[in-house]
Amino acid sequence: RFLMTSGNHAATLLPLVEEMLTATGWRTGQLDGIAVSVGPGSFTGLRVGLSVAKGLAWTAGCAVVAVPTLEALAHAAELHDGSVAALLDARKGELYAAIFRFDGDRCGRQTADALVRPDELIAQLPRPCAIIGDASERYGAWLQERLGSAVQVLPFPEHGPRGGIVARLGWQRLSAGSQTSPADLEPIYIRPPEAAVRFG
């Protein structure tokens, strides 16, 4: 199921899960694993997603698989051969960024997830490169202005994150023996939460 919402994720996520289980005729106890996007991204969104994934995994007694958000985002451009920069707007004039390279059906990570300023990003981008992620809405025109035809900005509404991609990458990891205990599952924040900065 895919739902674009800017409202309360905690109120929409569980009903979507229930709807999916009802549609398939499955019970939580029949699940082999639960894949969840672990960040970087919105602190609240990550906490809601991980809390739901952990709760369901404990209830179902199944594995939980962590999928990095920027990797899942990059796979929304997997029909694009070559370099892809997955970019999320981290606010405060910064971006969450990682660069991947697609060669046919293979995807190779070129950089670790990082928090960068736009000018730092320009120095790191391979040429040519496709840009994907919500940061394209704020920085896409700016990048195009500076790099011209060396970058292709993919429109975010058509190339946004998809739960189906997280599920597929999670299944690949689970099949390869990669899983995490619900108790050990942690979000990837990169930037410390603001409360930790203010009061830490």
Image (cartoon, grey):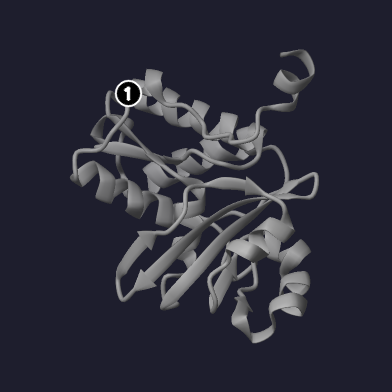
Q: Is residue 162 visible?
A: no
Q: Which residue is mark 1?
A: 181
Q: In the drawing, does residue 176 fall left or right of residue 134?
A: left
Q: Quadrant of residue 182?
A: top left
Which quadrant would the C terminus be assigned to in this image? top right
Horizontal side of 168 relative to 140 (left or right) equals: left
Residue 36, quarter of the rendered image: top left
Identified at 45% across, 77% down, the residue is: 80
- Kindly identify the residue that appears in the image at 75 percent across and 26 percent down: 194
The structure residue drawn at horizontal position 74% and vertical position 22%, both measured from the top left corner, is: 197
Q: Determine crowd level at label 1: few under 14, some 14-19, many 20+ residues with C-alpha closer than 10 A.
A: few
**Which residue occupies the foreground of this view, 77 or 59?**
77
Percent of width and height locating residue 165: 41, 57
Residue 162: x, y in percent?
50, 57
Q: Residue furthest bottom?
A: 149
Residue 33 vs 112, above or below: the answer is: above
Residue 39 can be seen in this image? yes
**Number of marks drawn:** 1
Q: Up-down: is 26 above or below 106?
A: above
